[in-house]
Image: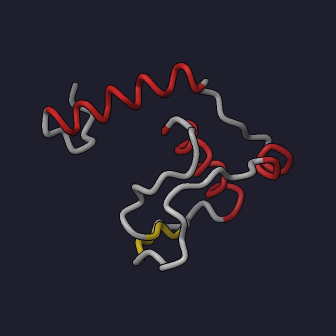
Amino acid sequence: MTVYDDGKQTRSFRYVSDLVCYLFVVKGAIDSSATIEFRENTADDPQKRKPDISKAKELLNWEPKVPLREGLPKMASDFQNRILNGDEGKGNK
């Protein structure tokens, strides 16, 4: 799997645990020995988008589990920790 740039671009309003679960489902469906490779971002890559997850639902039987009303406060708390407390995403609260 390839991650372009630093991986901090927004892709949708999905909570991180749903995304991680999805990545493991995809990795297992494609190649369980796959590694994650980081590359420079492409110039035409949008920084914000809303993906169509219908194929993930249909082919992998995957869909997000964390509702927006639950995930947004968690995300806001995480951002607050990163900005105000100098937490760089290490899970410190």
Residue in front for this viewpoint, 8 or 58:
8
Vertical placement of residue 11 versus 34, above or below: above
Q: Is 29 left or right of 1, judged from the image as shown?
A: right
Which color mode does the image show?
secondary structure
Q: Is 13 left or right of 63, judged from the image as shown?
A: left
Q: Is 27 left or right of 6, judged from the image as shown?
A: right
**Residue in the picture at 20% in, 38% down:** 83
Q: Quadrant of residue 29?
A: bottom right
Residue in front for this viewpoint, 43 or 82:
43
Residue that extends furthest to the left in the rendered view of this protein: 85
Place of residue 5 in the rendered image (x, y in percent of width and height, measured from the top left): 39, 69
Vertical placement of residue 79 versus 60, above or below: above
**Residue in the picture at 42% in, 59% down:** 7
Q: Which quarter of the figure is the N terminus placed in?
A: bottom right
Q: How many numbered marks does the figure carry?
A: 0
Place of residue 79 in the rendered image (x, y in percent of width and height, measured from the top left): 30, 35
Place of residue 77 in the rendered image (x, y in percent of width and height, measured from the top left): 32, 26
Place of residue 78 in the rendered image (x, y in percent of width and height, measured from the top left): 32, 32
Q: Is 65 left or right of 8, judged from the image as shown?
A: right
Residue that extends furthest to the right in the rendered view of this protein: 58
Q: Which quarter of the figure is the C terminus placed in?
A: top left
**Residue in the picture at 53% in, 55% down:** 48
Residue in front for this viewpoint, 76 or 17:
76
Vertical placement of residue 44 versus 88, above or below: below
